[in-house]
Image (cartoon, rainbow, N blue to C red):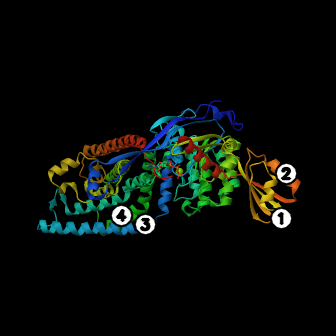
Amino acid sequence: MSEFPGKQVNTAILEPWHRTATASVGLYFHFIRLAFLKFLAYRLRYYTGVVSYTVFVSGHYYLYTALFASRVADAQGATIGGLSLSEVITYVAVSWIGRSFYFNNIARDLMRMITEGEIAMQLIKPFHVQTVMMFEAVGESGFRLIMFTLPIMVVIVPLFHIGGPPDSILYLWTFISFCLALVIYSQINFLLGCLAFNMKNIQGVLRAKMVSMDFLTGVVVPFTFFPEWFQRVVEWLPFQGISYIPVTIYLGKRPGDELYAALLLQVAWAVGLFVAGRLVWRISVRHVVVQGG
Amino acid sequence: MEALIKVRDLTKDYRLTRKREGVTGGLVDLVRPRHELLRAVESVSFDIPAGQMVGYIGANGAGKSTTIKMLTGILTPTSGTVTVGGLVPWKQRLQYTRHIGVVFGQRTQLWWDLAVVESFRLLKKIYEVDDATYERQMKLFDELLEVGKYLHQPVRKLSLGQRMRCDLAAALLHRPRVLFLDEPTIGLDVLAKENVRIFLREICEGEGVTVILTTHDLGDIEQLCKRVIIIDKGRVHFDGKLDDLRRRVGRQVRMTVELRDSATSGELASITAGLPVVWEEIEGLRHHAEFNRVEVPGAEVIKRLVNELRVSDLHMAEPGIDEVVREIYRQSGREAS
Ligand SMILES: Nc1ncnc2c1ncn2[C@@H]1O[C@H](COP(=O)(O)OP(=O)(O)OP(=O)(O)O)[C@@H](O)[C@H]1O
Ligand SMILES: [Mg+2]
């Protein structure tokens, strides 16, 4: 190779490359800020969101009011599935307010990245794509909290006379629980997105997800309205940690240690799904076929 | 000196699904999909010492991008080995990617929705570039690529040439030791191309960066790379100096001669009698002479001409390297058959 004398080079280049430590935690926090900035550029989109969420909640409001009126002569004081009418309305309002916070499109974004080959640009960077996406989701939710969740609360709470939780400390626990919900939701989405590594048609998966996810999380209908067997099944799934657990915490349905047990369950799912995501990613990337170029 | 980049028997197969025809075919596909292997890269081997700039060229679909994707750790090869600075790209991706810079001309690594400067700030964090180095690099990029003008524009609003310059700067911010460029001048106008070439020469030669560059613009190669590797259908057909390549192909040159007094091609041919030179008349005073420089010394042709005729101008054109590459393909085809 002496026929191609390289230029005089920095001798450091010739030293063996050391195994450098992987990206620091500080880096990942930077992604929170970036995601926040990114969504700020699209903030107009969220004003229409406020309207559509209010419409959703109104729909449920009238639906449940009518349901209670038809089921029991005296709607006041009656319960269905262990919830009174005002509790059901609160359940719906809080779960949609929560959804406005934890929602993201990681599955769709990741699938698009994989099918269009953009994933290549992530793989050439010294960071964990999964962790980056997680932190971006946190940034997005931070943005949503201010630009979306708060406006929705300002509209919905007085409109439907939504009361506070039985104990004001539950405000805090509900918020913490929704933060854990964000992690669970993101990681489920991440795992779904990874399906694009092995599947050609992912549109179907996305559509199925759209339909079933809100159902399984308990956003659409409280679990207690369902038959016993259904409730027993969802108890073993991670989805209840996304909406059902935080909302029932808000309603004060988890007295004493049950509150901590519920939060711990959320933590366990969050960690478990994160680890699963890391494993699936590691296996999938080995078989990745990047399109284009 | 040990090579920085070592590639041995690198092979990549893509699995293609062959669709059957018709409705029944579609149903059969669901149950038993038909797969076919496409060998995009086949037993590619080469060594590149530190500080060298290598042109990796070949026709569309030759396997250039596939090779680059394996060298950058994006794709896992079907077989063969690659080590760069002792690391295996697809196995030690996180450590490895710290040391390399990558530009895929067709894509951007900048954050699409954000101002360019945000991407640079993020890259600074990602690669843990210290403040002093960051400032120095940004100043350099502004001098050579004029990226300063675009720093506060969102990436999606940049023109292709502007974006490419920013992408190059982004790939070099952390002063990588190895740079992989897959068609870095694609879609650029002549001036922008020239800027990019000058930039690459300054940065890479100055800092001793090892570069592998693919391109369809052979001007890139001529200006940047002393060494070329030519691949076709996934196999290496030539690996050596650009000059050797020209010599091996034979140097067919074309000389344009302008005379003061008109002469016919026949008269000119008699002057160069004994030398395999083909004359062609363009117009009374202008003629083309084609000959192979290996067989015919150009100086001899010129000497004979000026002795016999009054020559007002002489001009010699080297073959473009694309002709050279075509010739290599042709020769290898002949050897193979
Ligand atoms: N993701 C993929 N799936 C299946 N086949 C692929 C894929 N990517 C590339 N190929 C095939 O592999 C071969 C080599 O492709 P590659 O992109 O490496 O070529 P290239 O030399 O970069 O070409 P170009 O100059 O057009 O960019 C081609 O025949 C191509 O069709
Ligand atoms: Mg290519």
Mark positioned earlier in the residue sequence (4 or 3): 3
Element class at badge 4: helix
What residue is shown with label 1?
B262
Q: What element carries label 3?
A: helix
Residue A45, label in figure: 3
First along the sequence among labels 1 and 2: 1
Mark 2 and mark 3: Cα distance apart in space: 79 Å
Q: Tell me the kind of residue under disc 2.
A: Arg
- Residue A151 position within the rendered picture, expressed as x and y whole percent measured from the top left: 39, 65
Can residue B135 be spotted in the picture?
Answer: no
Lateral position of residue B177 relative to residue B252, left or right: left
> Mark 4 highlights which residue?
A153
The amino acid at mark 1 is Ser
The percent coordinates of residue A272 (x first, y second) are 33, 41
- How far apart are the two marked residues, 4 and 3, measured between alpha carbons? 18 Å
Give the answer, above or below, for where B115 lies relative to A254: below
The answer to whether the residue labelled 2 contacts the one labelled 4, judged by CB atoms less than 8 Å apart, is no
